[in-house]
Amino acid sequence: MFRPRPRIELKSLDQVRLMRRAGLVVADALAAVRAAARPGTTTADLDAVAAAVIAEAGAEPSFLGYHGFPASICTSVNEEVVHGIPGRRVLAAGDLVSVDCGAIVEGWHGDSALSFLLGESGAVDVDDPSGGGDVAGQGLVRATRTAMWAGIAALAEGRRVGDVGVAVEASVELSAELLGTGYGLVEEYTGHGIGTAMHQPPDVLNFAASDRGPRLRPGMCLAVEPMVTLGGAGTRVLEDDWTVVTTDGSRAAHWEHTVAVLDGGVAVLTAADLGASGLEPFGVGPVPL
Ligand code: MG
Ligand code: MG
């Protein structure tokens, strides 16, 4: 049966450049949050760090007030997958922390997330395979990041939005096989179009679906954001109506970038280097802006 597809906002190059400015604010805020995280800091402390970076840049937080959300970032720890609310929670060494942040510049949004393990003196380098002694946690953080980049590379080389999900799923399966483990790939939450609003059509699924979705076109801007767990894929929402946790209590990781589809490839608007280093293993380079 014919189903009309929702209208997708296509951006001009000038509009993409405004989104790049928002993306760089988000990149700076996330880098500052990651650098500030220590055992003993609270998730509210991290929110204050992000809020200060966003304000200093003359930007606005996308999340604050979004459907009543009370903070500038989401902080999701261990079995929390996404949408955790910053507060009095004190971080401890060994925590797996996911931070999601959005910012608005002249009405245009950027949205990005990262995960890290917390060691005794701060965030553990994501490329350290030992993960500060937490090989399984680090494997999950890296597998989720790799899956995100695989999805972004699919935007550069693919034909339809659904090619992202095909690539993300294959990447997670490959990582699980290489590490001799099992991962859960969360399906209930997806990436999305982004531009004059944080969440726009189309949905960007993190798994292979029979409907491959809309054709990719220059000017589409999409958030690619896989969520992966060390257990099952099932999630539930806590009584705060925001925090999404795994139903089996397994830990989860979340990585996200905002990506512009352009003539000849992609530019990763929330990556300081436009995605050059993340895309390099896939033989893809970003389109300069
Ligand atoms: Mg986000
Ligand atoms: Mg998002």
Image: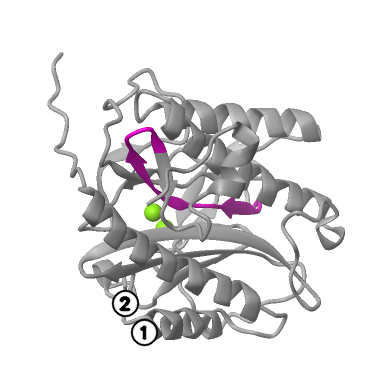
* Spot occupied by residue 20 in the image (x, y as percentages of width and height): 36, 60
* Secondary-structure class at tag 1: helix
- Asked if 134 appears above or below 87 in the picture, the reply is above
Residue 157, quarter of picture: top left
Q: Of 241 and 273, which appears nearest the observer?
A: 273
Residue 240, quarter of picture: bottom left
Using a 10 Å C-alpha cutoff, classify the residue at mark 1 as few (fewer than 14 neighbours), some (14 to 19) or many (20 or more): few
Residue extent of the magenta highlight: 250-265
- Asked if 210 appears above or below 206 in the picture, the reply is above
* Spot occupied by residue 129 in the image (x, y as percentages of width and height): 82, 51
Q: Residue at x 80, y 57 (%)?
A: 131
Q: Residue at x 84, y 62 (%)?
A: 132
**In the image, which disc is placed on residue 59?**
2
In the rendered image, residue 238 lying in the magenta stretch gets the answer: no
Q: Quadrant of ligand 1?
A: bottom left
| The residue carrying mark 1 has its beta carbon less than 8 Å from ligand 1 | no
Q: Are marks 2 and 1 in contact (CB under 8 Å)?
A: yes
Q: Residue at x 44, y 33 (%)?
A: 156
Residue 115, quarter of picture: bottom right
**Horizontal arrangement in the rendering, residue 48 relative to residue 117 (left or right):** left
